Image (spheres, helix red, strand yellow):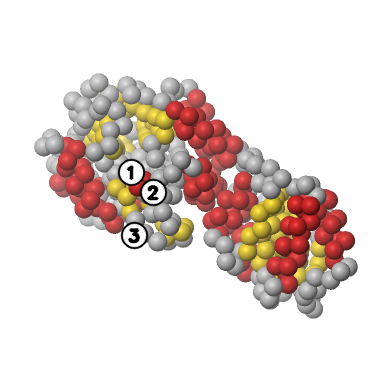
Amino acid sequence: MNMISDTIKYIGVDDLDIDLFESQYVVPEGMSYNSYLIDDEKIAVLDTADRRKGEEWKKNLTAALNGRQPDYLVVHHMEPDHSALIAWMLETYPGVQLVCSAQAVKMLSNFFEGVDFTGRVVTVKEGDTLALGKHTLQFIGAAMIHWPEVIMSYDTTDKVLFSADGFGKFGALVNETDDWACEARRYYFNICGKYGSQVQMVVKKMAALDVQTICPLHGPVLKGEALTEAVRLYDIWSKYEPESAGILIAYASIHGGTAKAAERLGEILRAKGAPKVVVSDLSRSDMAEVIEDAFRYPTVVVAASSYDAGVFPVMHDFLYHLQIKNYQKRKFGIVENGSWAPTAGKTMRTMIEALKDCEIVEPMVTIRSRMKTTDEALLQQLADSLL
């Protein structure tokens, strides 16, 4: 059994069988559903797990309890991958009290029809505390990271922040590597990316606390340099600032003509000294990875074929994802392709103009079916505008 401290135990589980997290994110390295237990005069269980791994989690809980009865189940987040076993806990342990936010109380009946929660719930808010003996949990409001009911808790004794989905990442713990940022970045921008201002509020609250350990609901426990780096990156990400110098070229090509133009632009940019150029085929790349790169770099080129008097659907989907994730503060270039009536550029421009504080540089390059020698000069001009 993994120990966070002398009295805080890890009782979470790995899921190596899952193919899509939240039915949309590819997770080739699996997923962890983290849960913790504080063994004190009163025992607090911190979150449960996904029903997919319920039996394994129950065994971990039973082993950690070692014959004792839990007093509290703290629910930081009501999403089913963390709360699926709430009803089982209340039925199995008649003395346990459910500790959660007022918003979470409103959601309980959504997930657990017919369960009687009368007299079983303790509602907490920002600044409230829960005394367990030597340990005291101090609650921190974290609404919209990334659901409205989310709370975090801080153990004032061992200086541990239980951060809900904050500071989480894709991947099972058994497959964990030293490169936390790679999958944490993809996780953050696709799941929490819309809520930068709310994340900033939590980062500022953390600065007032002596946080020595972060225990998220997904991914590894963070301490020392790893914790410091995670907080640094969260501060950058939640301000919508670029993390690295570079240019993303995202293209949507039907018969290969747009792909050739995108690849040629990438060659020109590299020749002109661009520090990093990433070229992604939206029809074949993991959309979540491309969204991650769009947030990572300060400059994006969208290159797409015209389609049904608009734009090829995968490009529309990409730009729609940026819109709903509150994408902002970036520079864009546009390359369109059209054999008889190019419309992709107009559609993409309209979608980009709906983003906050995003600049479109000129010229917009129009390709007619296949790139011609005369198009080279315009690609050169666009490259100069992007650098």
Which residue reaches farthest front? Answer: 271
**Residue 211 at x, y percent in the picture:** 42, 26
Q: Amino acid at mark 3?
A: Asp
Q: Give how far apart the Cα atoms at labels 3 and 2 are.
A: 13 Å
Which residue reaches farthest left? Answer: 67
Residue that badge 3 annotates: 17
**Residue 32 at x, y percent in the picture:** 35, 48
Asked if residue 362 lies left or right of residue 151, the reply is right
**Count of numbered tags:** 3
**Residue 30 at x, y percent in the picture:** 38, 54
Mark 2 or 1, which is nearer the eye? 2
Report crowding for label 1: few under 14, some 14 to 19, many 20 or more residues within 10 A (C-alpha). many
Q: Nearer the viewer, residue 343 or 364?
A: 364
Q: Amino acid at mark 2?
A: Asn
Q: Disc 2 or 1, which lies upstream in sequence?
A: 1
Residue that badge 1 annotates: 34
**Residue for point 34% across, 33% down:** 124
**Residue for point 20% across, 48% down:** 58
305 relative to 213, above or below = below
Are dots 3 and 2 in contact, CB under 8 Å? no
Report crowding for label 2: few under 14, some 14 to 19, many 20 or more residues within 10 A (C-alpha). few
318 relative to 140, above or below = below
Q: Secondary structure at mark 1?
A: loop
Q: Disc 1 or 3, which lies upstream in sequence?
A: 3
Residue that badge 2 annotates: 175
